[in-house]
Image (cartoon, rainbow, N blue to C red):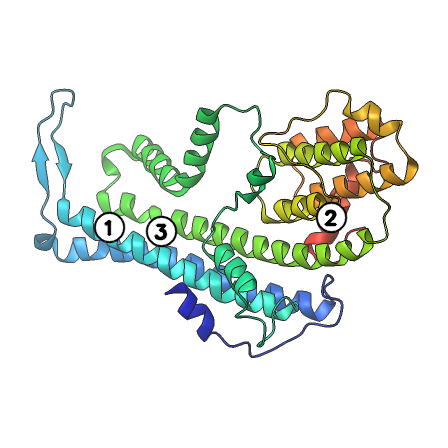
Amino acid sequence: MYQRFYNSLSAKKAVADDSVYLLNDEEVKYVKKRERITIFLAALIGAAMVLLLYLPQYWLPNLFPVNKFDLPFMDEPFEFGLVSFVYGMVLVFGEIVLLTLLNIYCTHHIAFSIGFITEETKKHKDKKDLLLSIGQEKKNKDIKKLGIDPHYGQKKSRVFFLNLLFTLKATLSNLLVKILIQRVLGRYAVREVMDMLGLPIFAFWNAWGTRTVLREARIIIMGQNYLDHFRNQLDSFRELSIQEKILLYDTLQLVAMSKRDYHKNHYLLSKLIVEHFNITTVEKHAVSTNYNKQLVSGEADFKELNETILLLGFVLDGSISYREKTQIRELNKSKVISKNEKEVVALAERFVYGKGLL
């Protein structure tokens, strides 16, 4: 269904110029306008779904019977409505489909507006699959095939728990607000007021989620375009020694561990470096213990290349976390990179707004 929807989309306006990895002012303006409209519609869908969930239950209570169950560990009977539950699940499914279609629609237009696709290339399998995966918020874990793991050394239970909290953020926010209001208002917190509290909460999280998806779409598309440009620059670089290849492999793993995320751009950068320099991969790669010292004592041209790859790795997802800032300070202090924390953050901001990188 999503593929048919994508194929049916037509781009009414192209604003791209010849610099496919940069955005001019007109392109930035066009993209931001599309994003604002899409974010507003996503918030509207979130609010509408809350109304669709509760208003029929208020107006037609006979269609939503509630059963009460006495449980030994509860003072009051536990209430559960099977029809309400199934109806809610249907609405959740419908909301997910609508938001996904909305994301695909805007992602398609962003890709077209900044020159990533044209009417002739939009149906090419690699481009279509990429844009559909962005719209559906699919994580790409292909980087693990290269022996690079963003969660290397982390406990699986911790990663799972953090992902679960992130997934349930809207539901948990709604629950916490209801508990807070119940504590404040007590018996005056009537059901209708409590139910409607979800309206702004789910509208906010839908808007936030869609904004994140569209920002990701823009970043991934610009990242791919820039890496195509960077690939041409690598063609003129000399043959690397075995030790230099290992150090580049270390760099890719270091960036992945700093990010702790499966980002498409990081995979593409890693794949480009591994294939271009014919680096031998292993099932799981760990950063060399004397990584910094080896780089500082290496050849000048290799140090420059490695710094470029490090900086690309840090900024290609468009954000620099507190943890990464600490890592950058350490690398700068060890003279592995010449740029400081503020300069790297500025590079990331330039990239997000389509102004290039290095």
Residue type (three-letter) at the residue carrying disc 2 = His
Name the foreground residue: 8 vs 340: 8
Drawn side of residue 313 relative to residue 110, left or right: right
Q: CA distance from mark 1 to mark 2?
A: 51 Å
Residue type (three-letter) at the residue carrying disc 3 = Leu
Q: Which mark is residue 88?
A: 1
Q: Helix or strand or loop: what does disc 3 sit on?
A: helix
Drawn side of residue 153 relative to residue 194, left or right: right
Q: Is residue 330 above or below residue 170?
A: above
Q: Is residue 11 above or below residue 208?
A: below
Which mark is first along the chain, 2 or 3? 3
Q: Helix or strand or loop: what does disc 2 sit on?
A: helix
Which residue is found at the position 14% from the left and 49% from the top?
83
Q: Which mark is residue 229?
A: none
Residue linked to disc 3: 199
Instruction: Please state the horizontal and vertical placement of residue 103, each as a whole percent of the image.
Output: 47, 60
Which residue is found at the position 74% from the left and 67% from the top?
24
Spot the residue most to the right: 300
* Image quarter of residue 235: bottom right
Instruction: Please state the horizontal and vertical placement of residue 197, each as a whole percent of the image.
Output: 34, 46
Residue linked to disc 2: 276
Which mark is first along the chain, 3 or 1? 1
Which residue is found at the position 53% from the left and 60% from the top?
131
Residue 146 is at least partly visible in this image:
yes
Name the foreground residue: 143 vs 210: 143
